[in-house]
Image (cartoon, helix red, strand yellow):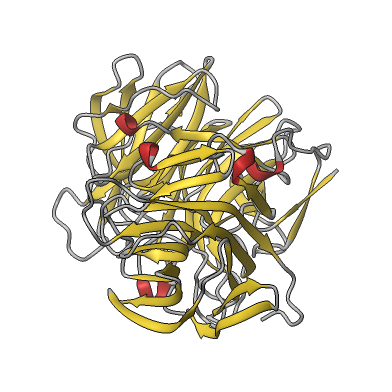
Amino acid sequence: MSVAKNPILAGFYPDPSICAVNDDYYLVNSSFAYFPGLPVMHSKDLAHWEQIGNVLDRPSQLPLKDAGVSRGLFAPTIRYNDGLFYVICTNVSFGGNFVVTAENPEGPWSEPHYIEGADGIDPSLFFDEDGKCYYIGTHPNVDGCRYDGDYFIYIQEFDVKEFKLVGKRVEAWNGALRGVHWPEGPHLYKIGDWYYIIHAEGGTGPEHAISVARSRDVFGPYEGCKRNPIFTHRHLGKIYPVQYVGHGDLFQAVNGDWYMVMLAVRPTKGFTTMGRETFLARVIFEDEWPVVNPGLGVLSDNLNIRLDEWTPELPENTWPNVSKKYEFKMMSSFGPEFMTLREPLNDSVKFDKDGLLLKCGTDNLSGTGVPSYVCLRQDSKFFEARATLYTDNLMMGTRAGLCLFQSEAFHVRFEITENRGRVVFVRGGKEELIAEDALRESPATIIMKVSGTALSVYSLNERGMQPFVRDLDISSLSTEVAGGFVGCTVGIFATDGDDREEPVFARFKSFSYERFEPVNKD
């Protein structure tokens, strides 16, 4: 017996999709404009997870030039059929809907096969018992949108050899509620004699919900469950600790039990800074309809899983939801848990016996270029990030340090420049200098400590932790204020305000991200 703790993937892991292959479970999430794209998680007990790679880890697979942080990759689906893994996804910034394949989920994955004529977003694949494959996706009402979010779910046969749509297209379903907004994230299944469409409704915010329809024929007509939506938290109000529940993907474990992964958020004082996270719920069938978390009707904090407890085999830094420490002199490359914006940094990163050299790039964090920023997902409301860097090689005009990043227009930087430490808060695209003081130590250790929606910033020297800022309100680094679809990331950065012939590199000794338990939880 294992015990899964919700969320099973904490932090910025939205739009989960999962497939079971024997006793292995593989899960992918949206990654938007971060590189590499679509993290691949693996588990054997649904409680403990390790990151085994990323689906799109080559620039040729993931064009994101000038994409805003909440553009790029939307809502992937992972499936397995006849010895091959398939991931289908939408790159809303380039090319639209595409499929990649791999013999092993850790990769390598193929180049994208862009699907001609597959408009809309949130595609999924379904492999039927007769060997046929079907595409299911969502797009604007073909008769014309009467209101924002007037979408339809459509189904069409898909040729997996040629990666193209074939045959008739059927507008199969447009949601359970009258005048429904944003029927999205559809998945198609066959269980027993029924074909099921499970999809999200109401947008990905407070009105998010999961509904289901079924038919005896893959093309319908589909009838909705009279209990729709079959799962939601939208009726529980803004004070409920878990909200925005939706975007479910159904699967059967090796022991025959049924489960569903889905997204939800955990706001603090009404603000969501970590983004949408991945949760797990139990499913049973009554009258051949799915019932989610029977007898409870909401997401639970813990689930008892009738599978043997399993410990991931990869290094702990590749396990989500654990503290992470990195001594750069011990490394030759970044692990799969690290991300950059839009492209890999490649020539901007060098490891040597003294640590990490990070190029002071001319693209900054407030633009849509490729800043020298290397980050991890924020996965706790309470964490401390530290970076130790040498300051004596930073030239005039260069800056390096730590950043808590929600988007180009909303982030906080603790930067060292010209022997001074500066805390800069970017809100709505406007920069504000919050604090500035001398910081001459080299190497210097700088610290960001987050407690809910409060950020404190320190430097560390022989006298201990010296505060630059205490309890800065960072509620604006939330979905509710900043908008978009992402959660915060935290990492190291280096920028240069001058266009030099010879680049300048900031030298980092170490970086750490550690969760902590607060004295009083909010």
Up/down of 131 relative to 470, above or below:
above
Q: Position of residue 30 (x, y in %)?
A: 44, 47
Up/down of 166 relative to 136, above or below:
above
Q: State left or right for residue 245 relative to residue 116.
A: right
Q: State left or right for residue 261 relative to residue 412.
A: right
Q: Residue 108 or 174: which is nearer the viewer?
A: 108
Q: Residue 258 or 143: which is nearer the viewer?
A: 258
Residue 21: in sight, yes or no? yes
Q: Residue 286 or 127: which is nearer the viewer?
A: 127
The image quarter in which residue 502 lies: top left
Residue 230: in sight, yes or no? no
Picture residue at 44% right of the left edge, 68% below the top = 415
Quarter containing the N terminus? top right
Picture residue at 32% right of the left edge, 27% below the top = 112
Up/down of 255 relative to 30, above or below:
above
Quarter containing the C terminus? bottom right
The image quarter in which residue 269 lies: bottom right
The count of marks equals 0
Up/down of 190 relative to 360, above or below:
above
Q: Position of residue 336 (x, y in %)?
A: 54, 39
Picture residue at 54% right of the left edge, 80% below the top = 237
Q: State left or right for residue 171 relative to residue 40.
A: left
Q: Position of residue 463 (x, y in %)?
A: 70, 78
The image quarter in which residue 43 lies: top right
Picture residue at 55% right of the left edge, 74% below the top = 267
Q: Position of residue 133 (x, y in %)?
A: 40, 23
Q: Residue 241 or 124: which is nearer the viewer?
A: 241
